């Protein structure tokens, strides 16, 4: 308790000092991987640069790379707050409890936590509806696969990843009833060697399309060694692997959201909220679909993207059963956000168990 | 569950690939520790080797030059460690940790502009009919040359330590540097050579990651492999053949668990994920009867 007061007091002193000197508005970013991962963290950093570009001298940004999820993150956030950050973006699911904890110690600092679900007066959460992009990937993957085996590299069994698997599977199954998903959990967001090994294991098992929910480009490099294996860019375009193996991608575009929130914080209109942007808001972009994909598949994939962008189609539209065969969504029913945010089950047809 | 989809020959072949970076880094560290020096900077030397090797290979379009560059990069960083700990007598643990942090930062700096580029990779050897032999062909005669080289290094280190005079001197320095000094051996030079060798091996291991195993350059791509190499040296009780076993066991279980998952085995994934660490530690602990070199980690100065 004492430490907490001390820290809060120190933060106020810093905040007071900052106000008096009319310093630039200071925004901190906590990254889970290195900026050079070419994926998730790379895109968050691009958005940070966009913030700097937008506000020029009136905003100063700081960042810390490769911060482990867990207790160590607390130290990093405290340090940022003590150094006068007015706002901190924590960009990985595993910082959730730590963000809330530090936010309590620094009531005057605004926090934005990516992909989590715990909020407070000074903690907002934001995420992107990646599952919309996954639907497009599944649609393409189901038609590209010759072996009818699609490999999926999962990071951690959290709702965000499970949603992506379900969405991709449903849309692959829709166009190819024979399709089968093989899922490998690597329990890391970033470990190129492990990710490459997982991709190879899946390819050895007959998979000829690899979807990944990890942050590095290593699975792409591993897939590039073999003819006839296709991949999708994850979080970033990963354009260096075009036109094959990478045939399309999901690009996370955080910049508009970051700029809007920093602006709100500077104006004093910032409020705690939960934001979940999809294809319609531009937060989820679909990277160029290359010529390795047949033209008619590309057309239908783009049409699918359009229908989700306009809000006319929801990727989780019933009838959909859970893995155990029980009914999840009735005919024509669409999933509500709450169920999606806490999704902890596979849909019918996927084999294997979700690690608990 | 259907285990028939897992091809044992392919599995063994890929476990050797998975284990080679750790094996190379660990055998280098083994020599360093047998000379009485504890260098915790393996991770930093590996990642520096990974980036130096990648840059050299991209520039010359020759993977062999890449491996030479990787070894040099690791060795140069190791010599920095030697300068600090052997000449300036700094604390080995602190210096080693600093070396890791320095290596990670330096590699990120050097690697800017090399992200997403493809480097020439090492083709597997093809001995024609031998490689086509069922099962053993792919395992024994179908690897890339670095796998054979890493095995040669292990054999070489074993023979060097066991049979050569120079190996005896190195071990003497590691066991009791005071006595070795009294006998007239130059402790500092012996240790500096060992440290440079360790750095070159760690660099090779890193280069193997960026040129063969992944193969591309990504910041922070070693992701802890250096620490595992350090642990394997200890669990192998500083013996080369046990170290080979440990590294292959670790690589093997890592690859096996990914294959089992991909094959749809109904074992909880958590157990599979921790199995490489558990199995390696268990086996090596059960076998271990070894003892650390007597002067390990102690600073040497001729006056003391």
Image (spheres, coloured by chain):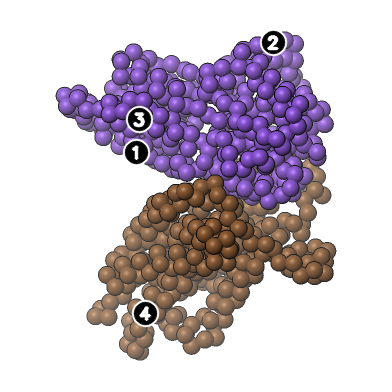
Chain colours: A purple, B brown
Q: Tell me where residue B279 appears, x and y as whole percent.
A: 61, 56
User: Mark 3–mark 1 contact, CB under 8 Å?
Assistant: no
Find numbered disc 3 in the image and state the secondary structure of the residue it sits on.
helix
Name the residue nearer the viewer: B79 or A249: A249
How many residues crowd around disc 1 within 10 Å: few (fewer than 14), some, or many (20 or more)? some
Q: Which residue is mark 4?
A: B189
Q: Position of residue A18 (x, y in %)?
A: 20, 27
Q: Chain of mark 1?
A: A
Q: Chain of mark 2?
A: A
**Image quadrant occupied by the N terminus of chain B:** top right
Q: CA distance from mark 2 to mark 3?
A: 43 Å
Distance Cα–Cα, label 3 vs label 4:
52 Å
Secondary structure, mark 1, is helix
The label nearer to you, 3 versus 1, is: 3
Disc 4 and disc 2 in contact, CB within 8 angstroms: no
Mark 4 vs mark 2: tell me if same chain. no
Chain at numbered mark 3: A
- Measured as percent of width and height from the top left, residue A183 is found at 69, 38
**Whether residue A120 is situated above or below residue B150 in the rendered picture:** above
Q: Secondary structure at mark 2?
A: loop
Q: CA distance from mark 1 to mark 4?
A: 42 Å
Q: Mark 1 = which residue?
A: A75
User: Who comes first in sequence, dot 2 or dot 3?
Assistant: 3
Tally of numbered discs: 4
Q: Eyeballing the image, is A318 above or below B259? A: above
Q: Are marks 3 and 4 in contact (CB under 8 Å)?
A: no
Q: Is residue B134 above or below residue A215?
A: below
In the rendered view, would you say B71 is above or below A342?
A: below
- 3D distance between C-alphas at marks 2 and 1: 45 Å
């Amino acid at each position: 308790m004492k430490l907490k007061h001390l820290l809060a007091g120190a933060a106020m002193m810093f905040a007071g000092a900052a106000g008096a000197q009319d310093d630039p508005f200071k925004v901190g970013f906590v990254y889970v991987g290195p900026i050079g991962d070419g994926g998730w963290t790379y895109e968050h950093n691009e958005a940070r640069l966009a913030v700097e570009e937008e506000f020029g001298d009136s905003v100063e940004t700081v960042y810390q790379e490769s911060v482990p999820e867990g207790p160590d993150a607390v130290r990093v956030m405290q340090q940022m707050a003590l150094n006068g950050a007015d706002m901190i973006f924590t960009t990985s699911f595993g910082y959730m409890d730590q963000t809330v904890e530090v936010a309590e110690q620094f009531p005057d600092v605004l926090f934005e936590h990516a992909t989590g679900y715990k909020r407070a007066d000074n903690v907002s959460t934001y995420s992107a509806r990646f599952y919309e992009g996954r639907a497009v990937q599944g649609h393409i993957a189901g038609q590209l696969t010759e072996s009818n085996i699609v490999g999926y590299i999962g990071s951690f069994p959290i709702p965000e990843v499970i949603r992506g698997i379900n969405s991709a599977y449903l849309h692959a199954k829709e166009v190819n009833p024979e399709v089968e998903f093989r899922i490998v959990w690597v329990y890391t967001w970033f470990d190129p060697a492990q990710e490459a090994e997982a991709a190879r294991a899946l390819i050895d098992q007959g998979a000829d399309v690899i979807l990944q929910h990890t942050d590095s480009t290593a699975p792409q490099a591993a897939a590039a060694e073999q003819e006839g294996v296709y991949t999708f860019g994850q979080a970033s375009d990963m354009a260096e692997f075009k036109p094959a193996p990478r045939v399309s991608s999901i690009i996370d575009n955080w910049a508009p959201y970051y700029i809007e929130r920093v602006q709100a914080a500077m104006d004093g209109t910032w409020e705690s909220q939960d934001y979940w942007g999809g294809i319609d808001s531009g937060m989820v972009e679909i990277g160029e679909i290359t010529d390795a994909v047949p033209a008619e598949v590309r057309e239908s994939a783009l049409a699918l993207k359009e229908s989700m962008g306009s809000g006319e189609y929801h990727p989780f539209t019933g009838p959909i059963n859970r893995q155990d065969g029980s009914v999840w969504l009735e005919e024509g029913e669409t999933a509500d956000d709450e169920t999606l945010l806490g999704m902890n089950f596979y849909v019918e047809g996927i084999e294997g168990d979700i690690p608990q | 569950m259907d285990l028939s989809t897992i091809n044992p020959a392919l599995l063994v072949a890929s476990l050797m690939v998975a284990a080679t970076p750790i094996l190379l880094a660990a055998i280098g560290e083994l020599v360093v520790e047998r000379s009485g020096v504890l260098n915790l900077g393996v991770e930093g030397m590996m990642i520096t080797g990974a980036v130096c090797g990648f840059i050299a290979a991209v520039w010359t379009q020759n993977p062999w030059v890449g491996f030479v560059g990787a070894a040099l990069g690791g060795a140069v960083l190791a010599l920095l460690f030697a300068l600090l700990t052997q000449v300036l007598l700094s604390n080995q643990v602190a210096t080693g940790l600093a070396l890791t942090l320095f290596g990670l930062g330096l590699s990120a700096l050097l690697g800017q502009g090399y992200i997403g580029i493809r480097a020439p990779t090492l083709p597997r050897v093809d001995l024609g009919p031998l490689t086509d032999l069922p099962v053993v062909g792919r395992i024994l005669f179908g690897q890339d040359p670095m796998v054979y080289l890493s095995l040669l290094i292990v054999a070489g280190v074993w023979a060097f330590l066991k049979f050569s005079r120079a190996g005896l001197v190195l071990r003497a320095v590691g066991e009791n540097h005071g006595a070795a000094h009294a006998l007239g051996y130059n402790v500092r030079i012996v240790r500096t050579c060992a440290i440079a060798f360790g750095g070159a091996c760690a660099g090779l291991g890193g280069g193997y990651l960026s040129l063969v195993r992944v193969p591309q350059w990504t910041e922070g791509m070693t992701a802890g492999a250096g620490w595992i190499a350090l642990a394997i040296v200890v669990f192998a009780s500083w013996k080369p053949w046990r170290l080979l076993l440990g590294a292959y066991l670790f690589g093997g279980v890592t690859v096996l668990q990914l294959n089992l998952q991909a094959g749809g085995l109904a074992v909880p994934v958590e157990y599979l994920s921790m199995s490489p660490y558990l199995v390696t530690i268990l086996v090596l602990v059960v076998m271990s009867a070894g003892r650390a070199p007597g002067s390990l980690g102690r600073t040497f100065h001729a006056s003391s």
